Image (cartoon, coloured by chain):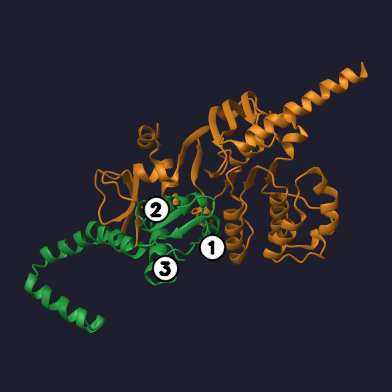
Amino acid sequence: MASEKKLVKNLEVIKIQHTLVYYLTNTVDMIKINNLNFGYSKHKPLFKNMSMQLSNGHIYGLLGKNGAGKSSLLKNMAGLVYAQSGTLDVMGFNPAKRQPALLEQICFIPEEFYLPSVKISAYIKANAPFYKNFNHQYFGNLLKEFDIPVSQKLINMSYGQKKKVIIAFGLATQAKLIIMDEPTNGLDIPSKAQFRKIMASAMTDDRCIIISTHQVRDLDNLIDTVIMLDENDVALKASVQEITEKLTFKKVKEVDDSIIYAEPSLSGYNAVMPNYHQEESKLDMELLFNAILAEKIKFKPLFN
Amino acid sequence: MEFRDNKAIYLQIAEYVCEHILLGKWKADEKVPSVRELAVELEVNPNTIMRTYELLQNKNIINNKRGIGFFVAENAIEGVKSYKKVQFMDDELPVVFRNIYLLNIGFDELKTKYETFVKENFNA
């Protein structure tokens, strides 16, 4: 009997390992969200029948107004809150079950966090063993790059320094799914540049990186796919390439009918319009964000 | 590198690479920075660099040696020149033409100006 149980358990382990190997060696949808319904109370749904797929080899930028549900979506992916109905599949697992085999592949950097009153060495001793691929040398390099005083107690560090410690820890776990909620909040100007460099080097083909942000100018050259949440659903999910093939962003002197949305600027208007002449303009993420909020209906036919 | 607002990032990076080649900083048959190295240096998504390198490969400016990396092509300078010429003809010349037309500037006047400019700047 005992050996039979052990065999079943071994088979479980093998199954989990196979699932992971599959997800880590192919370009696949690492996250599959199907008809997700979620809300903190029954009467106030946050997501209604939301569906979307996210694959490895990308840095997704998650945008949305305050309260649009960016953090809640990220928490759903990390298994910190549960769907009311629908399914959420992360690398073949249901994150709500919080299986260690999945959790060690998720690096979740929340916007608000708590760090205990210990030194970094003690923190690592207590937490790194949960991640079998934890890379101590890489962690050390990241701390050096971020200029962290390693002998200081975590609790005595500034918010920005603490944030850099957990970012370094998260990346050193070598997790394949990296979820960051407003990672550049609290970082000073040189740290933001360091952060961009670190993320550019952390983006490998086997990883899926999702970053929510209001500070689009901090990150717009890092993001290759934009996900925008609005009105309980995904208002836009498109790669930067697709967006700039369909739309052009430019300065104009006057606003005419061809323009979908425009904002006054010093020398005229910053405008978004359909890309009639195959122009290759630079995506202005802030303008796109405002444009979608203001003219959602005009964008729908372009991206379906 | 400072990015401008008016052109796709991958094209601005292509210009950056072309400039390095024209200035002789990156020479024929030399290895160019890997996708990741350039992504880190310029703080952009590696997929963007990949798009730049694919474009430059199509223009015969760089080559991909499988498993080793990207190299400056043997005739890269000609490649850069013809790529930049197309860009000039398509993007910049129409703006100049428009002004020539609107301001009613004669071609003879332009020719004299052009010759003086070349003499003053390039001693040719």
Which label's residue is closer to the chain start, 3 or 2?
A: 3
Q: Is residue A231 visible?
A: no
Subunit bearing disc 2: B
**Mark nearer the viewer, 1 or 3:** 3
Give the answer, above or below, for where A202 lies relative to A226.
below
Tell me the amino acid under the disc marked 1. Glu
User: Seen in the image, is A42 located left or right of residue A133?
Assistant: left
Q: In the rendered image, is residue A125 in sight? A: yes
Residue type marked 3: His
- Counting from the top left corner in percent of width and height, residue A130 is at 80, 43
* Residue in the image at 47% along x and 37% along y: A237
List the residue tagged with mark 3: B20
* Quarter assignment of residue A162: bottom right
Q: Residue at x 15, y 78 (%)?
A: B115
Which chain: green?
Answer: B
On what subunit does the disc labeled 3 rest? B
- Residue extending farthest to the right is A2
| Residue A244 placement (x, y as % from top left) | 38, 46
Question: Where A51 falls versus B7 (above or below)?
Answer: above
Query: Is A237 on the left or on the right of A157, as rendered?
Result: left
| Secondary element at image label 2 | helix
Query: In which quadrant is the N terminus of chain A drawn?
Result: top right
Mark 3: few, some, or many residues within 10 Å (few <14, many ≥20)? some
Residue B41, label in figure: 1
- The answer for how far apart the CA atoms under marks 1 and 2 are is 21 Å
Q: B36 or A152, which is in the foreground?
A: B36
Q: Secondary structure at mark 3?
A: helix
Residue labelled with disc 2 = B57
Among the 4 quarters of the image, the one containing residue A107: top right
Q: Residue at x 34, y 55 (%)?
A: A264
Looking at the image, is mark 1 or mark 2 earlier in the sequence?
Answer: 1
Report the chain shown in orange: A
